[in-house]
Amino acid sequence: MRRWKRRGTWARLGVIFACYLLLPALTTAGIGLFSTPDSGMMLFILMLFIAFPLVTIALAAWDGITQGFAVLWIVMPIVFFVVPMLIFFNESALIYGAIYSVLAIVANGVGSLFRPKSHSTSSPRES
């Protein structure tokens, strides 16, 4: 039960939620700077295929290395993606949220393999 109370995991999940909301908002605000009408669509596609997966993988792996494996990474990326999906995308983008959850759980699992093992001090070492 201590796993749910760790602030590091919740902070990284908060960063993912902020990225999921801020990147499309900044893209929408910056679309007027480009002259071609298709550049906005291109930026959203790059965001869905490159930016969101990289942020999700990086934060999930970092959490796996520092905190260990967490079941939260199965559910939270898709839950956090629902809000920007409804605001900036359409319902057909929900599959990307599921893909981000799969990427997050794999990255968290791989990152947890590289977590430093704690040493027990309750028993003396044998020389």
Image (cartoon, rainbow, N blue to C red):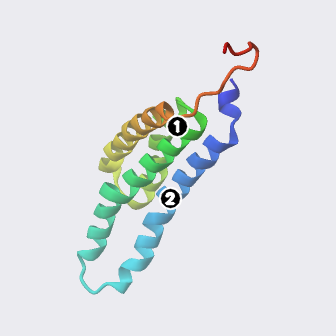
Q: Eyeballing the image, is 1 above or below 51?
A: above
Q: What kind of element bears circle 2? A: helix
> Does residue 117 lie above or below 47 as drawn?
above
Q: Residue at x 46, y 72 (%)?
A: 26
**Which residue is found at the position 34% from the left and 41% from the top?**
99
- Give residue 122's position: percent from left, percent from top: 76, 15
* Residue type at tag 1: Gly
In the rendered image, which residue does mark 1 sit on?
64
Q: Residue at x 67, y 13 (%)?
A: 126
What is the total number of numbered labels drawn onto the structure image? 2
Residue assigned mark 2: 19
Q: Residues within 10 Å of mark 1 (few under 14, many from 20)?
A: many
Q: Position of residue 69 (x, y in %)?
A: 53, 30
The N terminus, quarter of image: top right
Sequence-earlier tag: 2 or 1: 2
Q: Element at badge 1?
A: helix
Q: Left or right: 75 with respect to 43? A: right
Residue 124's x, y, as percent?
A: 74, 14
Location of the C terminus (image quadrant):
top right
